[in-house]
Image (cartoon, helix red, strand yellow):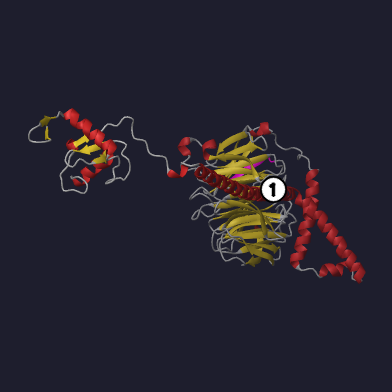
Amino acid sequence: MSFCCSSKFPITITRQLFVLLVTLYAKTCLSTDKIVSGEVPTEPVLSSKTGRIYEKRLLQKYIEENGREPQTDHGLSEDDLIAVSSDPPAVKPRPPTLTSVPALLSTFQNEWDALVLETFTLKQQYQQVRQELSQALYQNDAACRVIARLVKERDEARETLATLQAQVGTAAKSAKAAEDQMDVDSGKPAAEAEAELTPEEVYYEKAAETAKVLSKSRMKREVPAGLVSADAWKTVKESETVESLHSSTKPGIFSLDLDRSGDLALTGGLDNHAEVYSRSRDQTLATLKGHTKKVTAAVWVGGGGLDQRIITGSADKSVRIWAPKAGNADDANVRSIGWTKASIIKHHAAEIAGVAVHPCNEYFASAAVDGSWAIHSMDGTTLIADTIDSPISKIAFHPDGMFLGIGTGDGFAKILDVKQKQVLATLDVSSSNEGAADVNGLHFSENGYYFITTSPREAAVWDLRKQKKAHAWTLDDLVPEDSREVAQFTAARFDVSGKYLALVADRLYMFKVKGWSQLAALPAGDLPVHAVAWSGETSSAVVAAAMDNSLRYFSPAQE
């Protein structure tokens, strides 16, 4: 590289010397990259074409985007840049606001004011958070109090459900005494005051009186003398088979009820008839004809017998009351024994799901698959009627008669207060079993606490005091694996003593109550069994009614 001061004195300068001169020039003259950033470069570079100094980082970015030097038309690349070294490195000058004592004092004052303002704001937020926390704690305390009250009310309701029969009896007695006193004060005889009660009110009084008597007698009740022992039931076997009870053109028995002696079996069949069979005579004593569709329910009144009435329900939507003939007697000729139609009740608008006799034997309940239920007197008068929001599949009175147990077609068991017409408890039996949710069996134990429900896939014993399952069985628990696809739970029943339980699936299973230990498992025929009953006060036999029109009696081999 050559420079000429004059034509007479040429001077040759090396590249290193040129860079040194340029660096000195940059320090003294061009200390600021005013074109690109307007600030002192931290990593300065020199353009070999124009001699301008730039911030290397910013110039490289500009070249990548434009391919030329800023504010010129000269093409420029990174090879045309010369790094400028500065020792010591360039330091940013101190802001002019902090170069004097007054400026520092002003800055400190501003910082102090900002700190005080922030502290004040934090105190406000702290106070607000304290108020919100106080309100949240108050709401939490109130919620805890409400929950505690609800839990207490729930426990009281459960306790009331378990002991209401006694309480209702006491309340009824007090109410009656008060009414008698009012009658005395008004100068009316008690008989006249009672005559003014409506039939519905008479039913409520009778139900309360019956519940009081039965609840007291249950506390003193002893195990029936001669009750078959559990060890004897372990030796049970089929002792007798009765075939061809109903018409062979429409085979099938849906309902079974034995009289208290165990001799008379009342059955309802698919052939639209109900029949009374005598085991001792080994023949059918009577066929009750009149229904136009299958008989879905048939029950004895008053424990059954030749001198007792019969109630039947049918898919033809009617309920019939049958009165015994005057000639009915144990020693009478079979031709003179029978029952005549006393009354027809057509209250329901759908198929009858079940009938149940009240423990006082003066009233009975009926229910239909559309969710309607009613209480009737024995002369056929409907006293009380209502509906629930579910289809009904089974119905049974509690042993004290104050409540109705209802099995529904959507998989629930409901405990209904007849007087209040309210559901006191709803228990989920099988609502989650799609296609197999209907409750096809429901029966109360005589102890008043237990009742059993069956659905196609599960059977369960419930404790009314706790409203929980005391024990449950699934098909996997009882049925062999090769039979589970076709097997179903179809019926269940406690014996009169409340000590034993009969349960039907692919076989007839017998269990001891409380321990729930299995006593026996017996084949019950090739066709399904839809009804089962215990024979007599001593539970001397179990009877199963099958769809092949047969009755099978099972008795212990030793007693």
Magenta stretch: residue 543 in it? yes
Considering the image in quadrants, where does the C terminus appear?
A: top right
Residue 112 appears in which quarter of the rendering? top right
Describe residue 447's horizontal placement relative to residue 485 as left or right.
right
Q: Is residue 299 magenta?
A: no
Indicate the position of residue 454 as horizontal and vertical percent values. Answer: 58, 46
Tell me if residue 103 comes above or below residue 371 in the rendering.
above
Left or right of residue 394, residue 259 in this image = right
Give whichever of 111, 314 is nearer the camera. Answer: 111
Residue toward you, 530 or 450 = 450
Please tell me which residue lies in front, 90 or 333: 90
Q: Quadrant of the N terminus?
A: top left
Q: Position of residue 133 (x, y in %)?
A: 64, 47
Q: Secondary structure at mark 1?
A: helix
User: What residue do we see at 88% from left, 64% from top?
Assistant: 180
Where in the figure is residue 204, as x and y percent of width and height?
Answer: 76, 61
Can residue 279 be seen by looking at this rendering? yes
- Residue 278 appearing in the image: no
In percent of the image, x 62 and y 41: which residue is there? 502
Residues rendered magenta in the picture: 539-545
Q: Who is closer to the viewer here, 355 or 144?
A: 144
Q: Residue furthest left?
A: 7
Main secondary structure along the magenta-highlighted residues: strand
User: Left or right: 331 with respect to 505?
Assistant: right
Neighbor class of circle 1 (other Cα within 10 Å; few <14, some 14-19, many 20+) is few
The kind of residue tagged 1 is Asp
Residue for point 76% across, 51% down: 164
Residue positioned 75% across, 67% down in the render = 199
Q: Residue 336, position in %: x, y?
A: 67, 59
Q: Which residue is mark 1?
A: 141
